[in-house]
Image (spheres, rainbow, N blue to C red):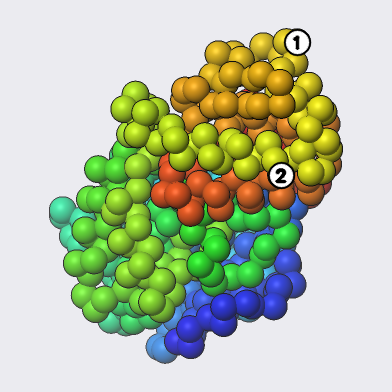
Amino acid sequence: MSPPAEHQPPPPATAPLKVGPDCWMVGHRNPHSLLQCNTYLRIFDQGAPLHVCADPGSQIDFPVLQENIRRLIGDLSEVHAFTLNHQDPDVVGNSPSFCEANPQIQTVVSEDVWRLVQHLSFRPGKVRFANAERKPRIEWGGGRNWRLVPTPFCHFRGAMAFYDPELRTLFSGDLFGGLNQLGRVHLFAEESDWVGVAQFHQIYMPTREALRYAVRQIRALKPAVEVIAPQHGHVISGDRVPEFLDRMYDLLVGVDLLATGLDTTYLKSYAQVMSQLVTWTADIMGRSEVLTRLANPAIDDDFESLVHIQGNDVRLEREGYSALVKAFDRLSRGEPSEFANEMRSLILSMCAERGLPIPPVGVGVEEPGGMGSSTLSPR
Ligand SMILES: [Fe+2]
Ligand SMILES: [Fe+2]
């Protein structure tokens, strides 16, 4: 598998993207979305043809997904099986359509996930439980199999990743997923995509201990993993696999970030980020406008308790992680999404440079239909 070029030309948003031989990403690369949902189609063409989808994906993306599958294998009814990492709507949303297209379709899912997802009332032809303790592999027939890789609490207790040893590709679900930057729809992860991965995990993963357990499982796989194909963002390949595994092992996420010790540990660095954010925004809208927004008493977010504003000076005093979210919200209100997205990228890169937990700024909420610009209020 050839390593990705550092600067890949943007692919068409609605075409299948090649992950490797006989493996495609068939989801929609919506350039207006911060959260790209990846569905993978694995084509086994030795022996009896077999087509397996990893995570059917979001209903919002269904028209594109259906067309991409049609282009590759003729029809949705030709999908013989799908796996589910966990039960979130962006993962399982198209399951009913898959079952309708092929009533004989199989699904492979952990019992913990199925207990919940069955309430969507779709009924595959066969449900095969992925239980690594009972049996570590799922056999597709004809000597073809995927290894089960439980990744508990990443981010659901029963989350199950699937490893294709022939392609050395791990379908990892939300684990290693990332928020992208608006307009960046390339397939393979580049260095600058790490911040989106870190931000996604800091929002959605519960604790570093869960990540560490999962990373240990992945490192132990034989043959060694060469490609990580997550359900969001970019596919990780080549040297980035061990690099991103190492970074993931050390990433503080979720409840780790609630620890009050972080406030003082990182306060100085967050203060630098706040100061640079103010300078950057002042260059665009003028310092008096920035100060007016940051001191606006009509906004009820307790921002004033975290900073000291005097004259032209904005000084961070506590809780930098939270203060940056509030500052971002105040400064981006009413501004075009391009401006907010640029500000988000700036904050992400400044935090990443300093090794800071990345605050959940600019977490887009898709407009109905998922095709419009993101709105940028995290609340
Ligand atoms: Fe999820
Ligand atoms: Fe997801």
Give the vertical position of 281 relative to 77 (above or below): above
Q: Position of residue 225 (x, y in %)?
A: 31, 73
> Which amino acid, mark 1?
Ala
Left or right placement of residue 83 versus residue 7 in this view: left
- The residue at 82%/43% (across/down) is 284
Residue 329 vs residue 371, the one in the foreground: 329
Residue 59 vs residue 311, the one in the foreground: 311
Give the vertical position of 81 relative to 357 (above or below): below
> Which amino acid, mark 2?
Trp
Q: Which mark is residue 273?
A: none
Q: Quadrant of residue 252?
A: top left
Residue 294 vs residue 65, the one in the foreground: 294
Q: Quadrant of residue 163?
A: bottom left
Q: Residues within 10 Å of mark 2 (few under 14, many from 20)?
A: some
Q: Which residue is mark 2?
A: 280
Q: Earlier in the sequence, mark 2 or mark 1?
A: 2
Left or right placement of residue 55 versus residue 253 in this view: right
Left or right placement of residue 254 versus residue 359 in this view: left
Label 2 within 8 A of ligand 2 by Cβ: no
Q: Position of residue 186 (x, y in %)?
A: 63, 69
- The residue at 79%/49% (across/down) is 338
Q: Position of residue 207 (x, y in %)?
A: 32, 38
Q: Which residue is mark 1?
A: 298
Q: Is residue 7 visible?
A: yes
Label 1 within 8 A of ligand 1 by Cβ: no
